[in-house]
Image (cartoon, rainbow, N blue to C red):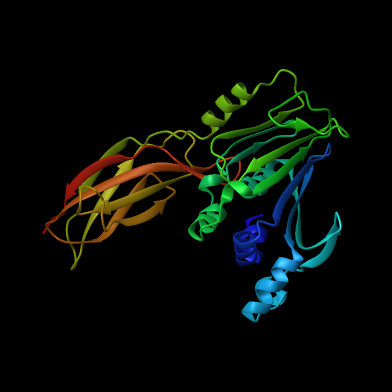
Amino acid sequence: MRSTKVKVLAVTAAVTVMFTGCMTENANVKINSDGTASAVATVDIDKASMDTWLTSSGLTTSDISDGKEMKVVTKDGKEFYEATETYSSTVDKIGEVVKEALSSDAYVTSTTLYSEVSLAQSESVAMYSAMGIDTSAITLNFSIEFPAAITSTTGTIDPANPNKANFVINLATTNMIVFATTDSTVTSDAVKATVQKLNQVGKVKVKSLKANKVKGKKATATLKFKKAAQAKNYQIQWSTNKNFKKKTSATAKKVRYTIKNLKKGTKYFVRVRAAKTNYCGTEVYGDWSVKTVKTKK
């Protein structure tokens, strides 16, 4: 959803909010009983205010819409420019879409949503703040609908639909729990514990780091380590500085890696950590394991 909120309307929203505060953002997610899911993201901006800014800037809506349609809609007697983007997905992948809407990792199943939201730290809000915009005056209206009635939520159950929970999230928000479930045995704390476990990946245990015999103009070293629990790949970095300034990085899938193009007779600091992609597409890492090696001359 960030393509709508940032790419399509970043300049539009920022400028309009700076002068008028007339902007609303809406994100609605629906989980279906057949395992599919959908999401709709909508941004409405006061048309009169935007037209004034566009005219003064010598621009048109096509100049700032990134190819997306910005239709004119009327709500409560006022006209707005509205940009909408629709997504179709599956339950196991919709968390990646919800993450973009909430600017925070989102754990989503067919019965439960959990996210620790801190919009104040998001990319969009950082842009607004840099322009002197009061982000506390802007809110995101977010909702999720399940195929069954919601039994517990930190939001508000929709009075017209017991399967739907609504959340009003201020853009200055930090550490807000967005939680809803249709399972009466599930609690927010229990899901939090599950999420924490899913975001863990084991620490790499290094077996050896040895300098190899020099055969050319550059030296090499071979790193061997044990497979870490939950790891999908490994991030390796090396530097002549113990704080890893001006480091070189590489990604490995196997537990043996040859570091090349090193200076002869030089001490290197080498570190490795395990990595995996979590439930909503975020890369998570284990702790670093650090070793040193001096290359041969």
What residue do we see at 76% from left, 44% from top?
Answer: 29
Q: Position of residue 93 (x, y in %)?
A: 68, 45
* 47 sits left or right of 104 in the view: right
Q: Is 28 drawn above or below residue 73 in the view shown?
A: above
The residue lying furthest to the top in this view is 185
Is residue 66 among what the camera can see?
no
Q: Position of residue 98 (x, y in %)?
A: 67, 45
The residue nearer to you, when weighing 268 against 12, is 12
What residue do we see at 54% from left, 50% from top?
Answer: 122
The answer to which quarter of the image holds residue 47 is: bottom right
The answer to which quarter of the image holds residue 73 is: bottom right
What residue do we see at 79% from left, 44% from top?
Answer: 36
Q: Position of residue 118 (x, y in %)?
A: 55, 41
The answer to which quarter of the image holds residue 286 is: top left
The residue nearer to you, when weighing 130 against 289, is 130
Q: Is 262 drawn above or below residue 188 in the view shown?
A: below
The quadrant in which the N terminus is found is bottom right
